[in-house]
Amino acid sequence: MDVEVLINKENRLDENYIPDDLVITDNNENNFHNFIDPNHKPMISKKVYPYFLKMKEDALKEGHNLILDSGYRSYQYQKNIWDDYIEKYGLEKTKELVAPPGASEHQSGLAFDVAFMKENKFVEHVTDDLEETKWMIKNAHKYGFILRYPKGKENITRYGYEPWHYRFVGIKLAKELYSKDITLEEYYLMVKV
C-alpha cells in the first residue's frame, strides 16, 4: 500500500484488505474499551514501525513516554466498534465519532492512536493540555506522521478533532502538510487541480 493513500468516508478499503507486513508492537492490548477483544495485540505496518520507535525514543529523551495504543484494526473489528457506538449513541452521533467499516485508516496498518505513560500511569484520554500532546503536534511530522484530524479542519476531514490519531504518510509529505497546515484531503484537492 502506498503510504500516501487517502482513506476516508469516500475512499474506503475493501473489507478483505489486510496488510501483509503487520508487526506486534506490544504484548498487551493497551485499550480498555469494552468492545476490544482481550486477545488483540497492537500492530502496525513493519515499514512504519521503525519511524514510530525513533519518535518514541526522541520523545522519551524529553520526558514523554509514547505508547502505540491502538494500531491495526480489521474491517470486522471496526464494524464491531461501529455497531457498538450505534447501539450506545445512535447513528447520527456515531457518524461524527467513528469511521465506518472500510473507512478507518487503522485497517491500513499506517495509523494508530497514541497514548502515554505518565507517572507510571497509563493515560488513554489524550487532551490538548498534556505536554505529550503538544510535543506530538509539534514534532510528529519529522518522523513521517501527521495529526490526521486536526482542530479547525472538521468540515474538511468530516471527523471531530482527535489529538490522539496519527497517520504515517512518509517524512517528505508529512513535512509538507505540516508546513502548509493542510490535511491529507486538502493535499489531494491541490494535486487534482
Image (cartoon, rainbow, N blue to C red):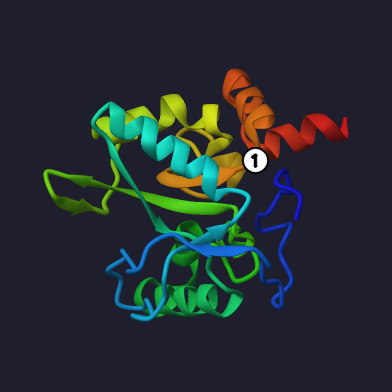
| Residue at 13 percent of width and 49 percent of height | 120
The N terminus is located in which quarter? bottom right
Say whether residue 148 is visible.
Answer: no
Residue 100 in the image, given as x and y percentages of width and height:
58, 68
Q: To which quarter of the image does residue 190 belong?
A: top right
Say whether residue 91 is visible.
Answer: yes
| Residue 161 drawn above or below residue 141 | below
| Residue at 32 percent of width and 65 percent of height | 31
Q: Secondary structure at mark 1?
A: loop
Q: Label 1: how many residues lie within 10 Å, few (<14), some (14-19) or many (20+)?
A: many
| Residue at 68 percent of width and 27 percent of height | 172
The C terminus is located in which quarter? top right
Relative horizontal placement of residue 163, taking residue 17 as reference (left or right): left
User: Could you say which is closer to the camera, residue 112 or residue 33?
Assistant: 112
The residue labelled by disc 1 is 169
Q: Residue furthest top?
A: 179
Relative horizontal placement of residue 50, taking residue 63 as reference (left or right): right
Residue 170 in the image, given as x and y percentages of width and height:
65, 37
